[in-house]
Amino acid sequence: MKKKIRSLEDLNRFREKAFEAKQRQTHLGNVQVIVSLGSCGIAAGAFDTLKAIQQQVDDDHLNEVIVSQTGCIGLCGHEPIVEVITADTSKVTYGHVTPEVARRILREHVLGGKVLEAFVVEV
Amino acid sequence: MKVIRSMVLVSVDQASLERGAEEVFHKFLEEIDEFGLSDKIAVSTIRDVGLRDDIPLVIVYPDAAVYGPVRLEDVHTIVEEHLYKGNIVPHLLALMRELAPEIAWTRDRRGTLPIEKRIVLERAGIVNPESIEDYILNDGFQALGKALTQMTPAEVIAEIDKSGLQGRGGAGFPTGRKWSFVASTPGSPKYVICNADESEPGTFKDRLILEGDPFSIVEAMTIAGYAIGAHEGYIYIRGEYPRAYHLIENAIHQAEMLGLLGDHIFGTDYSFHIHPHAGAGAYICGEETALIESLEGKRGMPRPRPPYPTTYGLFGKPTVVNNVETLANVPPILRNGAVWYREVGSPKSTGTKVYTILGNVNFTGLIEVPMGITLREVIDIYGKGMRNGKKLKLVQTGGSSGTIVPAKLQDTPLDFDSFRNAGVSLGSGALLVCDEDTCVVDLAKVILRFFRNECCGKCTPCRIGTLRLYEIINQISEGKAVLSDLEVMQNISEAMSEVSNCGLGQTASTALRDILKYFREEVEMHIIDKVCPVGVCPIAKHESELMQKAG
């Protein structure tokens, strides 16, 4: 059972720990792939996209890739949306990411370092 | 994709044209091109600016700066100083005066650029909604900690009151006042209800908040509970939102594990429990008294009001019912202070509003912008213009029970006061944009069919009225109606809005009323000429079939 938070100081300590954990996780060289899993994303097939990404990550042993989820960011017309945050480039947001496109993103962007301009959504 | 960041409107009414508006318009195009801004700035025209002598007027969005009279030689200065460098040119500004009566003009807009500003949605789409660590990392539970350990309940209410926060569910009732009513009403226990039964067609802002940032609702409900002295809270989530329900359940569980919800929150004596409850798909349960009935386990039918839920709510006890978006505003207000919140939006309608844009625009989705921006900006800047370059015909604001705003009113600022003056409801924040290919009769038919299905049947005007209205509009669309039917419709609609028991019946015919007000000619064409000008209604289809047969 986790330790209860009993004061604002406790909360801030918890926050610092969470921050450190996050830092460790996203240290240099790691790549974050974030799939937007709001209802709109799911309706557009985000679960299939997520599955394809996880499959690819497992198959290719991409240990440095962290796959996580988030809610909808309001670009419902572009779902499914996948964000890629690499250490060297800023955040890239892709729209209409089918499983096939997701595999290409992993191959060409995450591994190859080349952004797939055709699927980038301007935020 | 072309991203328009600013818009120039030149007035082109007859008087303006006589004074060289057309030349000014072309000069703008030239100058903007010269500065290499043509893919960032749109130039358009505005027809009716009312009777004034400082024409031609030039309005620059999003700053809402009005220049006038603009002579040919001023164009260069405006483009260079304002559009290129970003400084408003004070000596060319027009005098502050009302524009045409239908353009409720705002000149006291706070801040400079009404760019998207995220308060409610600051975390949505950024954090992992299943992780409390992510939430705490992004300022989560700071507001609750501050409220419980450093503020009295009265201070919390005073802060919310001072912020000017108004309910975002549609009616716009001041939240601070609602809380203080419940706090001062005798009776125990008291309850907090979060109304997440967002069933207004075209609205999905609450779902996005619940799915993107569920912890903020848990935190906000706890703050509300502390402020009014409640220890139990219910969140009534629309049945069609299973993912939101799952995420809220998870958020409640995780917060309880960390002692941020449940007994002895933050180590204090204050306890608060939240119970999620799934709706069963009835539109009427979004109405707060029907929602309360449904929570009590009865059939979801509205109660007569008064007494209001603030005195006689859940299980007959004083109850606060707040919309999801309203609650989502609470933690940021407590964290940053009421003064900070008042800086955003227009003076009388503070803060931001979340809008869902849908219909015939290039970008559909969701935006959060300060109160007081205009429909034109929403459509042209955030909606990225009309789809296929069609012309705007009307916008329905606030879902099916909302009002119809014709294209000529698109410069009305979107805030509670201006909308009230223009007879428009801001409602739930849905903006359904319809282009010239939309038939108003067809639109009314869809809306009235929806209400016919969703009427709960408790009171007669609504039960009979929604059915009769649907029957008549159906006849109009088939070309079988007579002109006097319009009077019948108007009578029914008036009766419904005056004597119906709850909001459903009172607002079911709002759209119809507006259509008859702004588009009566088009409706009459269906009846007199038996023609649907847009070619959507069954009469038109029937006609084309006849034509095909004929040859």
Image (tube, coloured by chain):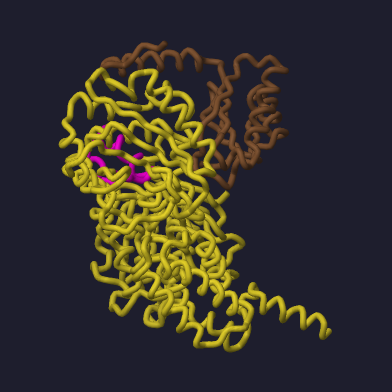
Chain colours: A brown, B yellow
Residue B287 in the image: above or below residue A78: below
Q: Is residue B327 left or right of residue B493?
A: left
Residue at (56, 32) in percent of width and height: A83
Give x and y (percent) for residue B461.
42, 70
Give x and y (percent) for residue B29.
48, 64
| Magenta span contains residue B186 | no
Residue at (22, 29) in percent of width and height: B147
- Main SS of the magenta part reads helix
Q: Is residue B362 left or right of residue B161?
A: right
Residue at (70, 30) in percent of width and height: A104
Q: Quarter of the image holding residue B337?
A: top left
| Magenta span contains residue B332 | yes
Give x and y (percent) for residue B416.
31, 58
Give x and y (percent) for residue B121.
41, 39
**In what quadrant of the picture does the C terminus of chain B appear?**
bottom right
Q: In the rendered structure, which segment of residues is drawn in magenta?
A: B320-344
| Residue sitting nearer the eye, A36 or B457 | B457
Residue B177: tell me if it is visible: yes
| Residue sitting nearer the eye, B346 or B199 | B199
Residue A75 in the image: above or below residue B132: below
| Residue sitting nearer the eye, B330 or B257 | B257
| Residue sitting nearer the eye, A41 or B500 | B500
Residue B59: tell me if it is visible: no
Q: Tell how many labels.
A: 0
Q: Quarter of the image holding residue B253?
A: top left
